[in-house]
Image (cartoon, helix red, strand yellow):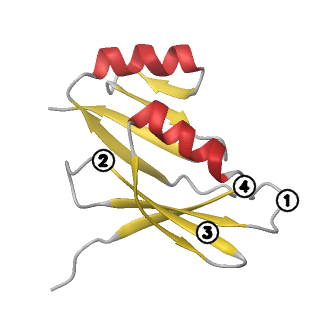
Amino acid sequence: MIKFAHNNFNVLNLEKSLQFYKDALNLTEVRRVEKPDFTLVYLGDNGETPHLLELTWLKDRTEPYDLGEDEFHLAFVTDDFESLHEKHKKMGCICFENPAMGIYFISDPDNYWLEILPER
């Protein structure tokens, strides 16, 4: 048997990223690993699913990450799509909308894209 454990994003400013994920998606810290050169913080969706987002902060990193041209993202489902869309609009973090598909994307402080889907 095999199952998902987590996804990882490297972040430049850990505190800024933690605040963004809390404010934008209500993700909360599940556990943290502190090492001399890096910190790992695992975020969860308050027990809705077992999936985690691992944020890796390399303490000596000062340059933004090059995310390349790959179109990779994480997707989140919400039962309150309209309210969440309005919240993200006010936060100024919506980076792409596709009304025909009924979805939109937000970007985090490191420009990772996060897809927001209505529960269907």
Residue denoted by label 3: 39
Label 3 residue SS: strand
Disc 3 marks a residue whose amino acid type is Thr
Image location of residue 13, percent across then percent down: 70, 51
Label 4 residue SS: loop
Taking 19 as reference, is 61 left or right? right
Marks 4 and 1, how far apart at CA: 7 Å
Label 1 residue SS: loop
Residue 57 position (above or below residue 74): below
Q: Do the residues labelled 1 and 2 touch (CB within 8 Å)?
A: no
Q: Residue at x 46, y 38 (%)?
A: 22
Instruction: Please tell me which of labels 2 and 3 falls first in the chain.
Output: 3
Tag 2: Cα neighbours inside 10 Å, few (<14), some, or many (≥20)?
some
Q: Do the residues labelled 4 and 1 touch (CB within 8 Å)?
A: yes
Residue denoted by label 1: 62
Taking 56 as reference, is 78 left or right? left
Instruction: Please tell me which of labels 3 and 4 falls first in the chain.
Output: 4
Please tell me in which quadrant of the rendered image residue 42 appears: bottom left
Taking 78 as reference, is 56 left or right? right
Residue 32 position (above or below residue 46): below
Instruction: Please tell me which of labels 2 and 4 falls first in the chain.
Output: 4
Tag 3: Cα neighbours inside 10 Å, few (<14), some, or many (≥20)?
some
* Residue 12 image label: 4
Residue denoted by label 2: 45
Work out whether residue 86 or residue 30 is closer to the camera in this orientation and state it. 30
Disc 4 marks a residue whose amino acid type is Leu
**How many numbered marks have been drawn onto this rendered protein structure?**
4
